[in-house]
Image (cartoon, rainbow, N blue to C red):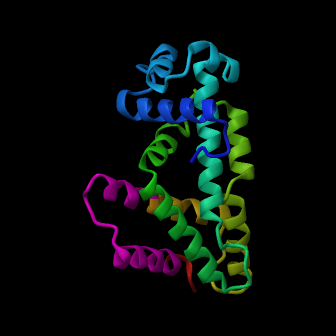
């Protein structure tokens, strides 16, 4: 997830993510990050001015990575349904493949630790706007009922998030049939 960062930054971000999932944010100190990552505290402070800066960079890195994965194969001339289902399937698969990243985003998206400007930038530059435009295309093509596209994207996102959470908690199995069923249900929820 953090391949765009240098070796030190990547080690710090990966270690911080693992520690936050294991111990929670409050129990994750800079000295613990240094100890577990094998990176000196001085080197960490060279790249990150504070723990909050690490947390915000972690958020940006995960959102950016997820956005790239979600939009793989999205910008094509294929039918709208194919493109939307591919994006949602990509979200499901990246969430299952990188559960710590998924858990972090779900837990800290509304946290005061994440700066407002970071949240706004993530939303503006993330994958949601691209999907909103295609939902609008679906409305104009009379494939979906008229509704605010932002609302539609968030409704589907919520359905997918709770299904992924149930899978990660071993409450249900996300096999191919379940994924196909979820995608079909999402499509049908707005189709005319």
Please identify the dominant SS of the magenta region: helix
Give the camera-side residue of 31 and 20.
Answer: 31
Q: Is residue 52 above or below residue 172?
A: above
The single residue placed furthest to the left in the displayed view is: 171
Give the camera-side residue of 6 and 23.
Answer: 6
Residue at (44, 24) in percent of width and height: 36
Residue 79 visible in image: yes
Give the camera-side residue of 158 and 90.
Answer: 90
| Quarter placement of the C terminus | bottom right
Q: Which residues are magenta?
A: 161-188
Residue 144 visible in image: no
Give how far across and how far down residue 108 sits, in percent: 51, 36
Give how far across and how far down residue 37 sits, in percent: 49, 26
Toward which corner of the image does residue 128 lie, by quadrant?
bottom right
Give how far across and how far down residue 173 sits, in percent: 29, 66
Residue at (74, 43) in percent of width and height: 121
Residue 63 belongs to the span the image colors magenta = no
Toward which corner of the image does residue 32 lie, by quadrant?
top left
Give how far across and how far down residue 181 sits, in percent: 39, 78
Residue at (52, 65) in percent of width and height: 156
Q: Is residue 180 above or below residue 29?
A: below
């Amino acid at each position: 997830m953090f391949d765009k960062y240098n070796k030190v930054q990547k080690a710090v971000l990966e270690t911080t993510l693992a520690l936050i999932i294991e111990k929670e944010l409050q129990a994750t100190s800079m000295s613990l990050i240094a100890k577990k990552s094998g990176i000196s505290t001085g080197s960490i402070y060279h790249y990150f001015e504070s723990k909050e800066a690490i947390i915000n960079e972690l958020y940006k890195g995960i959102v950016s990575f997820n956005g790239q994965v979600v939009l793989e194969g999205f910008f094509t001339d294929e039918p709208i349904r194919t493109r939307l289902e591919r994006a949602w399937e990509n979200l499901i698969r990246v969430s299952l493949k990188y559960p710590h990243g998924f858990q972090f985003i779900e837990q800290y998206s509304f946290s005061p630790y994440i700066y407002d400007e970071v949240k706004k930038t993530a939303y503006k530059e993330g994958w949601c706007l691209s999907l909103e435009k295609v939902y609008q295309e679906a409305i104009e093509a009379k494939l979906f009922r008229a509704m605010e596209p932002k609302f539609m994207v968030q409704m589907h996102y919520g359905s997918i998030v709770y299904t992924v959470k149930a899978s990660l908690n071993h409450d249900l199995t996300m096999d191919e049939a379940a994924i196909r069923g979820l995608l079909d249900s999402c499509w049908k929820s707005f189709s005319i």
